[in-house]
Image: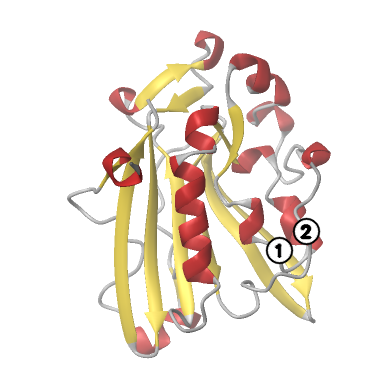
Amino acid sequence: MLLKRITITLSLVIFFIASCNKENIENTTFSNGPAEFPALSNNDASILLTHSTKFNGKNITTYSAEYDTSKKHARWVAFKFFDLTAEVNVNRSPDDSFAADPSLNVNYQRTRSDFGAKGFDRGHLCASADRLYSQEANLQTFYYTNMSPQKNSFNTGVWQSLENLTRAWGRSNTLRDTLYVVKGGTIDKEEQIWKYIDNDRSKPVPKYYFMAFLNKKGDKYNNSSLKIRQA
């Protein structure tokens, strides 16, 4: 059962400043970025990536990520659902849409050869189906900086089920005004890494994945997080 495969963390992943004026959080930018950003690490190999598009005359953030160039994997990916980004206007891009992130040197990115034949799916962190308000935004979810090596049974099983649940919340106007989402895989600690592709320490495979949520509805906020084991 799905619930048996989910381990709820004892401590929440906090990705907002609790002391801020909650009436203004939606339009607040903190020292580390927009309200949905987790605290940035002090790792010299980490860089902040943000992808956005012009939509209906507005500059809309598709998602942001703290990306570790030494491990060729995002530490986290953050995005949010609100009325505009919850729209479904286009279809998922075709499977040949996977591509190198144009904002980063390809030497710091995984490639197709790191998946597939190595036994792993190209698992989206920000899911393709989460960004269907524009075709350009959807294509940005296929960048390799948004991919994580996942077992097929995990990617198409518990991970997909949780993605579907997240999307149902994000598209429900009755549940949220804004749903902030942070997702990622564990790459920092050796005990949280399952293995390395081809024994290459620049290509870790996370043992755990996490999701964290902050939901705003009117003047009320609720947050939660969970951690799921892949292997």
Amino acid at pointer 1: Leu
Name the secondary structure under disc 1.
loop
Image location (x, y in percent) of residue 92? 75, 53
How is colour applied across the structure in the image? Answer: secondary structure
Q: Is residue 42 left or right of residue 121?
A: left
In the picture shown, does residue 67 fall above or below 134? above
Image location (x, y in percent) of residue 41? 39, 46
How far, Cα to Cα, is label 1 from label 2? 7 Å
Determine which quarter of the picture holds residue 231: top left
Q: Is residue 174 left or right of residue 100?
A: left
Within 10 Å of the Cα at label 1, are there few (<14), some (14-19), or many (20+) other Cα atoms? many
Asked if labels 2 and 1 touch by Cβ distance under 8 angstroms, the answer is yes
> Can the viewer see residue 150 in this picture?
no
Query: Which residue reaches farthest front?
Result: 1
Name the secondary structure under disc 2.
loop
Query: Which residue reaches farthest left?
Result: 10
> Can the viewer see residue 54 in this picture?
yes
Image location (x, y in percent) of residue 3? 30, 46
Residue located 46% across and 59% down the image: 165
Image quadrant holding the N terminus, namely top left
Residue located 64% across and 30% down the image: 108
18, 193: nearer the viewer:
193
Residue beneath label 2, please? 91
Residue beneath label 1, please? 132
